[in-house]
Amino acid sequence: MSAPLVIEKDRSLVTRLSTVFARNPVLGPGLTLLVAVIVFSAATTTFFSADNFSLIIQQSLVIGTLALGQTLIILTAGIDLANAAIMVFGTLLITKLATGGWPSAGALVAGMLATMLVGLLSGALVTRLRLPPFIVTLGMLAVMTAVANIYSEGTSWPVPDGLLQVMGTTRYLFGQIPVTFGMLFAVVLYLVVGIVLTRTAWGRHVYAVGNDAEAARLTGIRVGRVLVSVYALAGLIYGCAAWMALGRTPSADPNAYQTGNLDAITAVVIGGTSLFGGRGGVAGTAIGALIVAVLRSGLTQMGIDSNYQNLATGALVIAAVAVDQATRRRAR
Amino acid sequence: MKQFSRPGLAVVAAAASLSIALTGCTESRTVESAPVGADGGPVKIGLVTKTETNPYFVKLREEATAAAEANGNELIALSGKFDGDNDGQIAAVENLVQQGVSGILITPSNATGILDAIEKAEAAGIVVIALDTETDPADVVSATYATDNTEAGRLLGAYIKARLGDTQPQILTMDLDPSASVGVQRRTGFLEGMGVPEDSPDILGSAITQGDQTKAQQGAENLLQRVGEQVNVVYNINEPAARGSYQALKDRNLTDRVLVGAIDGSCEGVQDVADGEFAATVMQFPKEMAVQGVAAVETYAATGEKPSGFIDTGAMLITDDPVDGMESQDTAWGAENCWG
């Protein structure tokens, strides 16, 4: 008659395990990434190399940076469908100013200010008019796509050499490992945003607003201000993504990154940040962006059709949200 | 009741989706006993198209795969997600370099966006060849195998002009978009063939269609609203655009007095010509681009010799109403040689 005891033990193991996972939201995505890397390294001769890992990081930089801004917004239980369109507008503005005689640094600052202002506008519409973020940013997506096309007259422009393309510059670590300035920039951005989120009052407010905006308001948090600042900061980060995009693709093209918004949301969700707000963080997003790039690279090198790559990515998104929901139920 | 922990599920689900992917359709990797590669194995040839699903690129991929496999070599086909996905094309080129291909055939989405990636591939000793669309500058790649789009447009223009005879042309143009060189070249060629200058009042109006049937139909509807009864020529950048503008003409009962012309040469377009909907179409030969491109990479792998310059893969006027002094083929020939 010891069976019930065993069940009891099992249950406590499960409970303990799920507590570990719930306390370390990065654990699930981290293990997924590890498993994927091991599988691809075993399955192909070309995957496991410093060169290839460097490439995978380069391939995930632009979406990963968009996803960083997207994470902030999703933490507040919002969503941004316009991020890639805002970034593309940024690439066009920076390029046009720089080719029109502005100093490169000035063009970059102007471009980042512009994307920040667009973010600010989204945030203001969400808070002042009390519109759902989905609707505001859906509208903003159409507006920014149109603005980019009008501004560029539908043409793409080559990006001048120098500071504008610097994010694509490669240096070799230990003479072996290719590292681009874009990677370093992304690491710095992630660290700064991560520290601000976890170590400052503003960061705690972001989580509080995402958990329960009404409760946050009752504790004296100025919810509207927090939201506007989040959207503005996200806009600034999209400007940084624009700089990285210029280094990676030396052409400012109004047709580029049409799926960037959903790609960024995918990275955030796979990284374990909850679409319902208040749970998750930037470390998970970095891992999420890497998981998507690792899948694409590894499956490509195994000769697997891209339809199956999309299928695998889609399954991961659903799995990640299912896990999030289950963890929430346990937490209640 | 033993159960997985939920987060454990994530890993299981991830592993499951991976294994689904792993057991999925892999490209057929033919390895026959025809060692041509530098290391004695089969030559690996990469192909990067603009999108995966456009029938034109599907044809390009099928023909390139067949051409490579005929010699026991291997074709790895990748693509961007949409027309304009420069980032996706760059990632594809990088992946092919990782896989140690001897050559890369690419249809660039953007004439300048992928130059860096191409230069890196060239630096790694890989021959890069553009198919269908030129890069800018064109000499970043070793060679370009493509339709001479200006000539294709000129053929269509000259044919329509001959069909009109003494009638003054009243033209609508269904264009691609201002950014695409293909669109500019075809339009320029067409007007040249018609003998109509760019600023002529005989051009009643133009619409940006992006080669899309729905956009072309809307554009033509709006233009016909303005200039309806005078039109007698509609030039179209491609066959989907032509289908859209034909629908707009049909809704206004104008099809009898208007000559609809297109450029593409897809099987559906040839059928449209056979059905009397289009006066003519100009056929391109993606098969030639694929076959010649693959052969060039195989030659490079064997001898180190690179192709160079612009290689015109030809254009053919397809119509069932031929005019004197112009070479053309009928729709029966078209149906045998079409793509898509």
Image (cartoon, coloured by chain):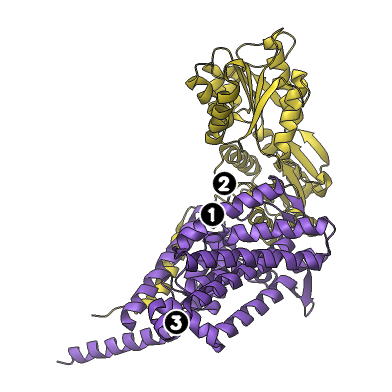
Query: Label 1 belongs to which residue?
Result: A306
Residue B23: image x %, image y %? 45, 58
Query: Label 3 belongs to which residue?
Result: A208
User: Are discs 2 and 3 less than 8 Å apart at CB?
Assistant: no
* Quadrant location, the N terminus of chain A: bottom left
Q: CA distance from mark 3 to mark 1?
A: 40 Å
Query: Label 2 belongs to which residue?
Result: B52
In front of the other: B251 or B314: B251
Asked if both marks, 3 and 1, belong to the same chain, the answer given is yes
Q: Residue at x 83, y 61 (%)?
A: A102
The amino acid pointed to by label 2 is: Glu
Left or right of B12? Residue B114 is right
For chain B, what colour was chosen? yellow
Give the class, few, some or many, for how many residues have Cα within 10 Å of label 3's Cα (few <14, many ≥20).
many
Left or right of A161? Residue B250 is left
The amino acid pointed to by label 3 is: Ala
